[in-house]
Amino acid sequence: MSFRLTGLATGTLYYVSVSAVDTDGNESACSLAASGVAQIDFAVSPIGTVNFGSVNLGSFVDQTFTVQSTRSGTVSGTASTSAPFSIVSGSPFTLVGGGATQAVTVRFTPTTAATASVNVNFRADGDTISRLVSGTGLGGMDTTPPTVTITSPTSDPTYSTSSSALTLGGTASDNVGVTQLTWTNSRGGSGTAIGTTSWTAGGITLQHGSNVLTVTARDAAGNTRTAILTVTQTDTGTLTFTDNPLLAQTTSIKVVHILELRTVIDAVRGALGLAPFAWTDPTLTPLITPVKVVHLTELRRALNRAYRAATRTPPTYSDPTIAAGLTIIKAIHLDELRSAVRALLEEQ
């Protein structure tokens, strides 16, 4: 059995002895005394007063404390403070095993032009550690936006590449300090850059055609400024169609021919800002799903819409009027669609 003593004074030497009592109330003699110095279950760093510095009204600054377990087992606790300071993250905390750590982020958000000093209190297992924090609010609000520049892969406003992925790099500055840089792609995707004064943003996926990449620098006061690079992805992709070319009266029309055209037409539509087409029989199974006239009709309709979005005249098709039960789908019908897709991709 075990018993945990609480309410002890840290650093004090204590002596403890125990006795046993049976069910009849008979008590044994006391054991030999054991001794030990009471110690707290966790530690907090840094030690001493933490100064958040001078911060403009309307802005904030974060500092990180580290809570570390000093014993085996599990130590659970909380961190708290008072305005104009606040706990941003890390509370409550649970430390499992000796030496386990957790970061606790404290934020200073001044509301008056004065110096503030309060305690940040860390409590766990009946123990409390306090750290004094201070900061000074400045009367003037920071209204100066940061600067941000894209320098890689080019400092020009436009760039062309056949790659489907891109890494941006650049610099940023601010009269107080840049706190974050983020990026977005007009064709989808966003993320956070690594670094501030010198930054990189990797893993940017490009879509065929024009991709407008916007990098936004933000300071602690919430002021922002952007830099823009327009990247043209020139690779038309692998347009190696199955059974290319389709031979009239020789090649059988297959489900794979329809599926390949659907995929590339949806890609073209996406490059032009259109949503994927709502296909009939969205799941076509080879040797099970029959190819229908409606499948051909929808391919033409979806591609025509892409042509109009690109301000181009839609293609002219053989057998412009097709009808279920009457029109036989021919090799020329699909070859025309393949050629029209290639032509549209080449001009994007």
Image (cartoon, rainbow, N blue to C red):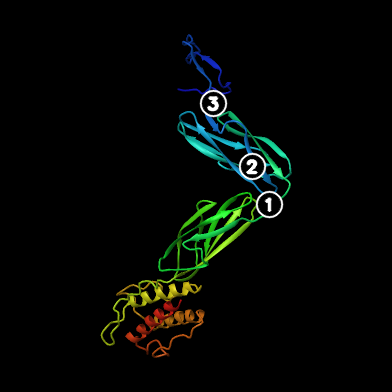
Of badges 3 and 1, nearer the viewer stands: 1
Which residue, given by chain and number where applicable, does mark 1 sit on? 142
Q: Is residue 323 left or right of residue 68?
A: left
Res 83 seen here: no
First reached walking from the N terminus: tag 3 or tag 2: 3
Residue 104, image x, y percentages: 56, 40
User: Tag 1: residue type?
Assistant: Asp
Q: Is residue 75 left or right of residue 83?
A: left
Rendered position, 323 above or below 50: below
Q: Quadrant of residue 121?
A: top right
Q: Which mark is residue 195?
A: none
Q: Which mark is residue 86?
A: 2
Residue 16, image x, y percentages: 51, 14
Which residue, given by chain and number where applicable, does mark 3 sit on? 40
First reached walking from the N terminus: tag 2 or tag 1: 2
Q: Residue at x 70, y 47 (%)?
A: 57
Q: Alpha-carbon neighbours of circle 2 within 10 Å: few (<14), some, or many (≥20)?
A: some
